[in-house]
Image (spheres, rainbow, N blue to C red):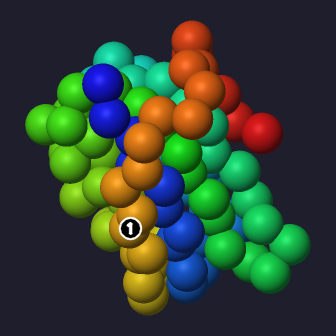
Amino acid sequence: MQQVHLIISGTVQGVFYRASCQDVAVKYGLNGYVKNLLNGQVEVVAQGEKEQLEKLVEWCKKGPPHAQVDNVEITWEDVDKTHNAFTVL
């Protein structure tokens, strides 16, 4: 199992980014969370198989239809604690 930490910038709040991200993560069998940050960015921490994580990363670069993603910071990390679902925080 691997973990990826993403910080997504752009028009990513108020456009159903978190709910859509959760749907995609669940579809790929991933665990972790997605949450809004106070500075207008969205944070994603996801755990699972690398191939599925890479699919989520590619989705995050586009987001849902009304999002405008300007940048995605991608950090591959050691699994710090195991999540047993993918939740919206």
Residue ID at (54%, 69%): 7
> What residue occupies the far right of the structure in this picture?
38
- Residue 62 in picture, x, y percent from top left: 33, 67
- Residue 41 in picture, x, y percent from top left: 67, 74
Residue ID at (48%, 24%): 31
Quadrant housing residue 52: top left
Crowdedness of circle 1 by 10 Å Cα count: few (<14), some, many (20+)? few
Is residue 78 visible to the viewer in this orientation of the structure? yes
Quarter of the figure that contains the N terminus: top left
Quarter of the figure that contains the C terminus: top right
Q: Along the horizontal axis of the image, is 63 left or right of 88?
A: left
Above or below for 60 versus 72: above
Q: Along the horizontal axis of the image, is 6 left or right of 38?
A: left
Is residue 64 visible to the viewer in this orientation of the structure? no
- Residue 22 in picture, x, y percent from top left: 52, 34
Q: Along the horizontal axis of the image, is 68 left or right of 35?
A: left
Amino acid type at circle 1 is: Ile
- Residue 61 in picture, x, y percent from top left: 33, 68
Residue ID at (35%, 55%): 76
Q: Along the horizontal axis of the image, is 64 left or right of 9?
A: left
Number of callouts:
1
Quadrant housing residue 69: bottom left
Residue ID at (23%, 27%): 49
Which residue is label 1 attached to? 74
**Element on which disc 1 rests:** strand
Above or below for 38 versus 24: below
Above or below for 44 versus 75: above
> What residue occupies the far left of the structure in this picture?
51
